[in-house]
Each structure stands twice: as structure tokens, then as C-alpha cells.
Image (tube, rainbow, N blue to C red):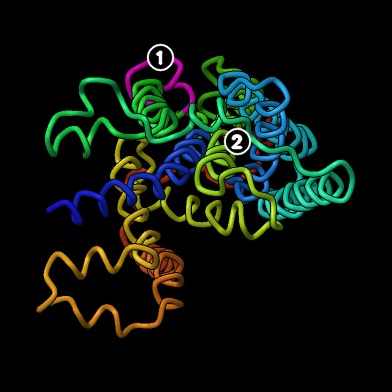
Amino acid sequence: MEAFIQFIVQSVRYGTPLLFGTTGEIITQKSGSLNLGVEGVMAVGAIGGFLFATWTNSLILGILAAFVCGALCGLLFAFLTVTLQANQNVTGLAMTIFGVGLFQFIGQNLTSGSGFPAMSAELAAKVGENGIPLLRDIPVVGDLLFSYNPFVYLGVVIAVLCWVYLFRTRTGLKVRAVGENPAAADGVGVNITRIKYLNIMLGCGICGIGGLYLGMVLRSGRYDGYGDWIAGYGWIAIALVIFAAWSPAKAIGGSFLFGLLLSLQAYRGAVVSIWPAGLSWMNAIPGEFYQMLPFLLTAVILVITSIRKKKDGGSPTALGLNYYREDR
């Protein structure tokens, strides 16, 4: 039982950055914009938030800085695709290249110069698995629900608030209307440009926090090159939007499911110990297969979605299409 609980706990840890990335991309896509640059946005949020957190020795300021860095990336994306009407797919890919390149440029220059900044003991303790006092001591339930770092609870709260925002508020109705039929929304007085700008920036800001989580929690602030920080999480988050049917609430379960797959490589021994007789075959599978498994499932989800004849009810009709008011 202890091994099983630890496996679930690690799955939540690995799935949390996906929750931020997926929730942020859902907000962006619900407004009708398809941002394929989540990987780059998370990279910019990671390096910006981490540097600010280490310089100020404040986790809260680091999270705010990560959000601002991500939002600035969203501002750039919105300017190119909403104001200049650039192709959203190409712009998103360019954002990935830009974000990853900026991450590497800053990281390598800091490493070759005065050295990449390290987290203080105080800051490391703040992002540690300290959990919620008293509640974390409850047998079983305490480990499963109350033993995580602050990012985990922040991610769940943000996902729930985003669900309320999209599906239970008047502004959220306007956002969904813009994503479904911007011409009709424009006809009843909705400011299309403002809606798109604000929600793209909001979504990218949330993605930036996910990048900071990867840098501070899963990578412990060690800079060894780009692959050791973001490592494809942004691309998985884009596929998880489809898996979650464009619902931030469903993204919570989907993210932790993918976290389970991501943690299998490192913790499959704990899984085997739960039932050695029936699960011993898992040790015979090369570790590279477990590393590939989340991306394989991502590809399967995209293939299944593309061949489905019946349109998914959560997908915005105008997703990825630029709006030309003159054509209304």
C-alpha cells in the first residue's frame, strides 16, 4: 500500500506542469486562437520566473514573474495573429523556437559567466513536499491529498477558477461566443480584439507558471540544457486539451493520468512491488519505452480525434481561424 501511495503522489507531481499548460491553452483556444507555442511560452516562464525567484528569494514573486513572462509571450502572439492577422500555426511554431532559444541563450550565458543562480535553502524548502500541516498526518488520505508542494494546489485552484470563468460567468460566455462565431459575437457588440488579447495573455501566463514548476520542482533549479527543463511538456499539454474536451475541470484528471505515465520510468519498481507475481514483466521492458509512452499516447489521441466523424462538442468552431471584420 505504501508503494502504491508513493506512486500516485509522484504521478501528481509529474502531472502538475501539464495541468498548468493544459488549462492555459484551453483558455486561449476557447477564445478561438490556436497557440502551438506552449513549449516556448513555458520555457520563457521557467527562466524568467526562476531568475526572479532566486534574485528576490521569494516564491510568490517568482510565480508572478513567470505569469508576467508568459503573458508577454501571449501579448506578442496576440499582436501577430489578431492585429497583424498572421497565420496562427506558423506563429505558434515560431513562438516555440523563440521561447526555447531565449531560454538557452539566457541559461548558457549565465552558466558561462558568473554561474547559473542556485536556489537558497529557504526557497528550496518553500517548493518542497511539505504539504498542509496537520492534514498531511492523516493516514493514507494525508499522503494522497495533503502532502504536496504549493504549486499542486495552485494548479488545481486555477483550473477550477478557469472552469467557473468559462462556463459560469457572463464574460466566459462572451469568450466562448468569440471562439464559436466571432462574427455573431461582433454583431451583438462584443469587442473581439479585446477578448482575444486578454484571454491569450491569461492563458499564456498560466502556461508560464507551469514552466516555473518544471524548473524549480522537477529540475530542482539545475541548468543542464533545454532538455532537462521543459522536455516536451508543452506539446503534451496541447494534446491534453483535446483529451480534456476543452474543459479545465477535466484537465485535472487528464493531467494526473499523463503524470502517471511520465512517472512510470522512474517508479515502475514501486508499481511492481505492489503485485510482484503479476507485474514483474514491467521490469523487462526497456526504460526508453516508458519515456516514450506519454508521447505515444499523445499521438494516438491526435489520430483518433482527426478520424472521428462526429465533431467534439468542446472544440471551438472558429479555432485557428483569423477573424476579418470586413467579411462579416
Residue under circle 2?
Answer: 208
Magenta stretch: give its range: 166-175
Residue at the image point whose x is 71% and y is 58% from the top: 225
Looking at the image, residue 80 lies above or below residue 11: above
Task: Sort mark 2 into few (<14), some (14-19) or many (20+) by Cα contacts within 10 Å.
Answer: many
Residue 129 appears anywhere in the view: yes
Mark 1 or 2, nearer chain start: 1
Percent across and percent down for residue 278 are: 11, 77
Residue at the image point whose x is 38% and y is 35% from the top: 129
Q: Amino acid at mark 2?
A: Gly
Residue under circle 1?
Answer: 170
Q: Say which element carries label 2.
A: helix
Residue at the image point whose x is 26% and y is 30% from the top: 146
Was residue 87 drawn as part of the magenta stretch in this picture?
Answer: no
Looking at the image, residue 142 lies above or below residue 165: below
Is the Cβ of the residue at disc 1 closer than 8 Å to that at disc 2?
A: no
Task: Sort mark 1 into few (<14), some (14-19) or many (20+) by Cα contacts within 10 Å.
Answer: few
Residue 181 appears anywhere in the view: no
Q: Main secondary structure of the magenta part?
A: helix
Percent across and percent down for residue 14 are: 41, 50
Between the residue at mark 1 and the residue at mark 2, the CA separation in whole angstroms equals: 26 Å
Q: Quadrant of residue 145?
A: top left
Front of the two marks 1 and 2:
2
